[in-house]
Amino acid sequence: MKILALNWNDLKNPYAGGAEVHLEELLRRLVEYGHEVTLFCSGFKGCRTEESVEGVKIIRRGNRYNFNLVAPFHLRRIVRRQKFDILVEDINKIPFYTPLYLNLKTLVVIPHLFATTVFQEINFILGTYIYLAEKPLIYVYRGKKYNVISESTADDIAVRGVPREDISVIHCGIDRVRYSFDPQVKKYEKPTILYLGRIKKYKSIQHLISAFKKVKSVLPDARLMIVGTGDYLPSLKKLAGTLGLEADIEFPGFVSTENKVERMRRAHVAVLPSLKEGWGLTNIEANSVGTVVVASDVPGLKDSVRDGQTGFLYEYGNIDRLADKILLLLQDDNLRSSLEKQALEWAETFNWDHAAKKFEVVLEEVLKS
């Protein structure tokens, strides 16, 4: 197949996240299977406008602020010149509405949709713009096939009107070489909680900091690491100061992959308190290195965490319940050890190679339809 993929960012973009990891893990394997793949995405400061990364040709145009506006012009030119068989459109921000100007077999990939949760992240005006931009999605893409990464997202778009038979679910994989369990690595001496990911308001890390205040009242030597970068970082540092926790919370910013994996392995518990996710890839990454997780019981995260087996779920926004779940894992070594073993078994079931093979089949079915 000659495949054109469309996504807002690529993995080299500073704003890349789990959606980019998911898409490009699949695309690179499709190249290995003999398919020709081009990824069209937005540009960023200092980027190359075109390059090849592990066999995937990447074309970058525009920037994060205008990409959806310039994309139709460039896409029409690219399609006229290269005659692709199929388009993979990854919708993890504003839809590009390609059926309005491209005549291509299309698979719509959706990590998750924002809906009203967008107002938790940005101002009302921009939030309204994104919210309204999502509204015509089901109508414009009617008749298209959808691929999602969790049952929660499948439920979400089915409720919006997409027939269930048009939705396929393929879970994310895991890089088992990078995120591997090492029995020689010991947990930190002090009870350590880890958040790792982008620092955005909707990730609700402020809830974790507030819960950590209660954890500290019970376990004075506990510490918290908030690893990552994002525009909400100054607000979190301010909150830590207000609560008198500056000395107990580490904000290392961006870290190397090696450092990230070491922190995951050595932390006693990883926490993802987000308002909504497509899946929760960091939950599986943590489980894969032998660390249990606590996550909010919301779409996406409730799919990637087996409550009471690989970690715990708690009611989103309930600070006391979050603190209680963390304390339970930090204070009961036998319980945590039992969950760690189950977490490793759960993580073993996720494989990018298997996911890519399933994705290839879905693409072939779209071409035949």
Image: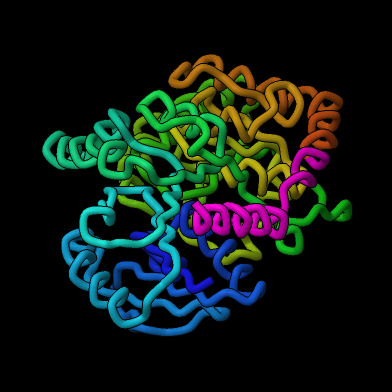
Magenta stretch: give its range.
344-369
Instruction: Judge whether 107 appears above or below 46 on screen.
Output: above
Q: Quadrant of residue 113?
A: top left
- Residue 221 appears anywhere in the view: no
Residue displayed at 51% across by 79% down: 53
Q: Residue at x 26, y 37 (%)?
A: 139
Q: Is residue 281 left or right of residue 46?
A: right
Return the x and y of residue 49 as percentages of the image width and height: 32, 82
Q: Position of residue 197 (x, y in %)?
A: 49, 49
Is 127 placed above or below 366 here? above
Q: Is residue 83 magenta?
A: no
Task: Judge whether residue 15 can be spotted in this image.
Answer: yes
Q: Main secondary structure of the magenta part?
A: helix
- Display coloring: rainbow
What residue lies at 41% left-to-right and 54% top-to-bottom? 90
**Looking at the image, which is closer to me, 318 or 48?**
48
Locate residue 154, reporting x and y percent: 50, 33
> Camera-side residue: 11 or 133?
133
Q: In the picture, residue 329 is in which quadrant?
A: top right
Which residue is located at x 60 percent, y 55 percent?
A: 359
* Direction from residue 141 to residue 252 in the image, left or right: right
Q: Foreground residue, 246 or 266?
A: 266
Q: Is residue 261 above or below residue 225?
A: below
